[in-house]
Image (spheres, rainbow, N blue to C red):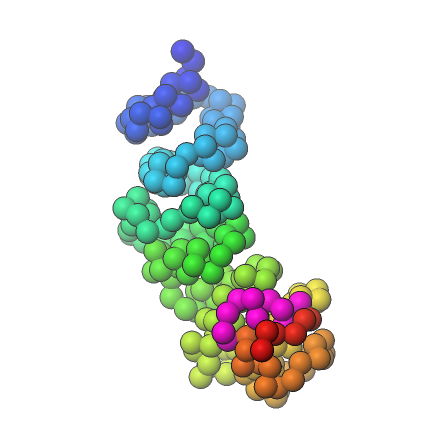
């Protein structure tokens, strides 16, 4: 059995000491190969619990090499079985907070684009104790309807910070794509950002803005230039 197979076997048996031992014996080429195989083949085949258990021990072994392997959770997200409320995630959160706090933002930026539901994103932030300013900073970097909805909800909870909301709106305007301009216009109108110069991209009545608070479907309709469900 070659070293790569030994690593596979160790992971399958939760033999983390064995996994680390076999990886430490790999040359650079084999190590890069196992990184790719873990991201593309091994991790996507695991259950939610086994995924995060394996990921936790990969991070503990060599964070820099395996942090990006979190993209392999995309299959769990698409199948709507991803779950951040488990013991392995708790251990991962504690480990990163104590050893590599800067890596938490990097992990958020890896995971946010692959998540598909409101509850997934909210659960992720809660699992890693991400404060609201960091949430906003992370969400601003990405560009999808669900991300903009989560940004809107986060800003609604801190609507008293008009200056911060205005800065977020200006940042989104600079993206210049149609959806971002719609989002900026929604923010300008909803939060009464009178000092923000934003091109009018939507024909929406003021009373309709209250409907976007109700649920994601209404928000999505307005964001895409449709009417909310009244």
Residue 168 at what x, y percent from top left?
55, 73
Which of 14/208 is in front?
A: 208
Residue 36 at what x, y percent from top left?
52, 31
Depicted 162 relative to depicted 91: above or below = below
Toward the front, the furthest residue is: 230
Depicted 129 relative to depicted 75: above or below = below
* Residue 62 figure quarter: top left
Residue 53 at what x, y percent from top left?
33, 38
- Total labels drawn: 0
Image quadrant where one finds the N terminus: top left
What residue is rendered at 42% in x and 76% in y? Answer: 157
What residue is rendered at 43% in x and 69% in y? Answer: 133
Depicted 17 relative to depicted 137: above or below = above
* Residue 10 figure quarter: top left
Q: Is residue 220 magenta?
A: yes
Residue 71 at what x, y percent from top left?
50, 43
> Is residue 95 visible in this depiction of the protein?
no
**Side of 86 relative to 159 (left or right):** left
> Is residue 61 visible in this depiction of the protein?
yes
Chief SS of the magenta region: helix
**Side of 77 relative to 9 (left or right):** right
Image quadrant where one finds the C terminus: bottom right
Toward the top, the furthest residue is: 1
What residue is rendered at 65% in x and 84% in y? Answer: 205
Which residues are drawn in magenta? 213-224
**Side of 11 relative to 42 (left or right):** left
Q: Is residue 124 magenta?
A: no
Which of 100/36 is in front?
A: 36
What residue is rendered at 40% in x and 23% in y? Answer: 8
């Amino acid at each position: 059995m070659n070293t790569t197979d030994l690593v596979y076997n160790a992971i399958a048996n939760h033999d983390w000491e064995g996994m680390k031992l076999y990886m430490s014996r790999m040359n650079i080429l084999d190590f890069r190969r196992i990184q790719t195989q873990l991201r593309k083949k091994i991790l996507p085949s695991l259950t939610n619990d086994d995924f995060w258990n394996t990921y936790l021990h990969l991070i503990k072994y060599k964070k820099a090499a395996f942090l990006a392997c979190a993209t392999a959770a995309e299959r769990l997200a698409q199948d709507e079985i991803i779950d951040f409320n488990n013991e392995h995630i708790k251990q991962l959160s504690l480990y990163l907070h104590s050893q590599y706090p800067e890596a938490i933002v990097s992990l958020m930026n890896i995971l946010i684009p692959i998540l598909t539901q409101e509850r997934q994103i909210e659960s992720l932030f809660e699992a890693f104790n991400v404060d609201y300013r960091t949430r906003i900073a992370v969400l601003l970097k990405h560009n999808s309807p669900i991300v903009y909805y989560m940004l809107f909800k986060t800003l609604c909870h801190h609507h008293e910070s008009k200056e911060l909301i205005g800065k977020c709106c200006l940042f989104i305007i600079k993206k210049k794509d149609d959806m971002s301009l719609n989002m900026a216009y929604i923010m300008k109108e909803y939060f009464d950002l009178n000092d923000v110069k934003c091109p009018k991209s939507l024909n929406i009545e003021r009373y309709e803005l209250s409907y976007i608070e109700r649920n994601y479907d209404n928000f999505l309709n307005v964001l895409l230039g449709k009417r909310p469900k009244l």
